Image (spheres, grey):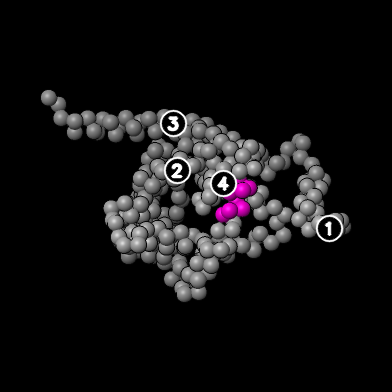
Amino acid sequence: MRSPLRWKPLKNLGLIAFSVVLAGCTIAKPRTDDPWERWNRKAYAFNDAADRAVIRPVAVGYRKVTTPNMRRVLSNFFSNLRMPITMVNNLLQGRPKDFTRSTGRFLVNTTLGLGGFFDPASQMGLKLQEQDFGTTLAKWGVPDGPYLVLPLLGSTTARDIFRFPVDRTFDPLAWYASQRDLKYGAQYMPTWLFLVTLRSRGIDAESLLEGVYDPYVFYRDAYRQQRVYQIYDGNPPVEVIELLQGVGEDFDPDELLEEQQRYEKGKTGKEPQAQP
């Protein structure tokens, strides 16, 4: 009787070959509609209220008790700790060079960077280029689907939502929490600290919201653009950028201005001043 262990290398080889074939698929164009907007706005309002009441105050408190250097080394640590997610997705995308680069970055920062608290890999040219299962599906040709806002999780799409359970499989933070049962849920403390560091970094960008006529639209469009740049490794085609920006033969800047004025009128109850 043949041992099942003899079939494991063949099975893994088949999975890698399958991933390489899928990686050759054409990336689907991003969607610009919002069929689930009614639900999304409700979820966005809930998330905004939760952020103002709890999440942001915690992040502000974290910034008060830490220095910029402390926050930087903690961010370095978590970025390095979660590098296996990028490494696995580089393999699934059939990109051996990127897998080698991300693995090298992980090894250099884990050793020379003292557990990932420092980032000598970037100085050696091994730049951080994160991947997840959402970008993997995109490079396999899976369309992004409708934009979706989830309570507490925030912006995603019908395609990107699958990155949460799949990437968790390769996340050391999830491994740590799943193998322990501590008092008061203390096994989740590293994950909570990671999330606080993420929110803390976002405070520096809050000034971008000043003067934004519809924050929901701002977050939606920003998410879509960020994902497109990540999927195309920072160099999306011009036609994709124009599609996201709504620039085309039927683009009417006056219509966009009127839409903003209608929103401001509904928000303040006053007629907005005409632009000079």
Residue that numbered label 1 is attached to? 270
Query: Which mark, residue 149?
Result: 4
SS at badge 2: helix
Q: Quadrant of the N terminus?
A: top left
**In the rendering, at what x and y percent does residue 178 appear?**
31, 51
Residue name at image x 80 percent, y 52 percent: 261
Look at discs 2 and 4 and give the one toward the viewer. 4
Most foreground residue, 270 or 59 = 270
Residue 188, by quadrant, is: bottom left
- Kind of residue indicated by mark 2: Arg
* Residue 180 horizontal side relative to residue 273, left or right: left
Label 3 crowd bin: few (<14), some (14–19), many (20+), radius 10 Å: some
Residue numbers of the magenta segment:
40-47
Front disc: 3 or 2: 2
Q: CA distance from mark 2 to mark 4?
A: 14 Å
Other residues around mark 4 within 10 Å, as few (<14) / some (14–19) / many (≥20) = many
Q: Earlier in the sequence, mark 1 or mark 4?
A: 4
Q: Say left or right for 258 vs 54.
A: right
Residue 237 in view, yes or no:
no
Q: Which mark is residue 163?
A: 2
Where in the figure is residue 133, as x and y percent of width and height? 44, 42
The amino acid at mark 3 is Leu
Q: Amino acid at mark 4?
A: Val
Q: Secondary structure at mark 1?
A: loop
* Element class at badge 3: helix
Identity of the residue drawn at 50% across and 71% down:
61
Question: Which of disc 4 and disc 3 is earlier in sequence?
Answer: 3
**Which residue, given by chain and number where applicable, does mark 3 sit on?**
22
